[in-house]
Amino acid sequence: MDSESPQAKHVAIIMDGNGRWAKQKMLPRVMGHRQGVEAVRELVRSIEPMGIDCLTLYAFSSENWKRPEEEVGDLMNLLRKFIKSDLLEFIANDVRLKIIGDYKGLAPDIVAQLEDALDKTSKGSRILAVALNYGSQDEIVRAANLAASGGEITAETLEMHLDTADMPPLDLLIRTSGEVRLSNFLLWQCAYAEMVFVDVLWPDFTPDHLQQALDDFSDRERRFGGR
């Protein structure tokens, strides 16, 4: 890799395949989600040595409420446990938690946990952004309404009101499980992001897979519409 190769500083991941992973192993779906949380932990620990400044994870979309009530409940309980068990590690590793999406639409105890974690990690230098109750079309509509209230809507004023306004530009989007679509995730931010789609199911995704995607990114020539 030469010194001119692009380096991905902001990476976003659509974590897909927990259910299929569990089905392949004839396990309940919740076991796939639990193993998916372990994959998240390992990845968060790897971002500093890989030179990533911001990692954004698609954890729960605004459409995920349509899933069976039991599965949604399992996901919310895993979120509670994850915040409680990993908060001190975030602080120790200089990670700042950020939430994108309408997280205040979650259960009040989860909202309280999240806001406590946001406060306690606010000084971190590396960002872990988690998309909760998030839908990109909704985000763009909210941003447009806010921009309109201040005058003319331009690309710049709209971008200032996105959930990601204080985050670096998105360099690389990864989706696991072999699916090739964005699923209403970071539609605005993906305008010139590079994309990598891998067949690996999320619970089996490791820091080595992330490094392979970063190496792929570094071999690309980013043109941003130019020649």
Image (cartoon, rainbow, N blue to C red):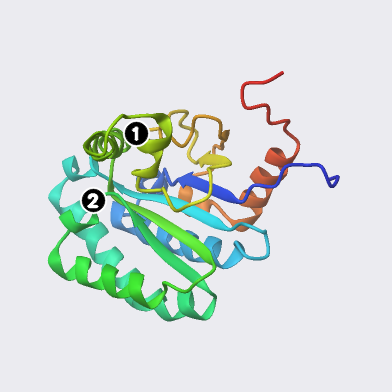
Quadrant for the N terminus in the image:
top right
Direction from residue 145 to residue 69 in the image, left or right: left
State the residue in front, 59 or 4. Answer: 4
Residue 59 position in % (x across, y down): 35, 51
Residue most extreme to the front: 151
Q: In the rendered view, does 38 fall on the left or right side of 100? A: right
* Vertical order, 202 against 77 (above or below): above
Considering depth in this image, is 178 or 192 the residue closer to the camera? 192
The type of residue carrying mark 1 is Asn
Residue 179 horizontal side relative to residue 22, left or right: right
| Vertical order, 45 against 5 (above or below) | below
Residue pictured at 49% horizontal, 61% vertical: 127
Q: Residue furthest right?
A: 2
Spatial CA distance of label 2 from label 1 is 14 Å
Q: Residue at x 64, y 43 (%)?
A: 213
Q: Nearer the viewer, mark 2 or mark 1?
A: 2
Q: Position of residue 34 (x, y in %)?
A: 36, 61
Q: Classify residue 4 by image quadrant.
A: top right
Residue drawn where x is 13% and y is 50% of the image: 69
Q: Secondary structure at mark 1?
A: loop
Q: Residues within 10 Å of mark 2 (few under 14, many from 20)?
A: some
Q: Which residue is mark 2?
A: 102
- Residue 184 is labelled as 1
x and y percentages locating residue 185 in the rendered image: 38, 38
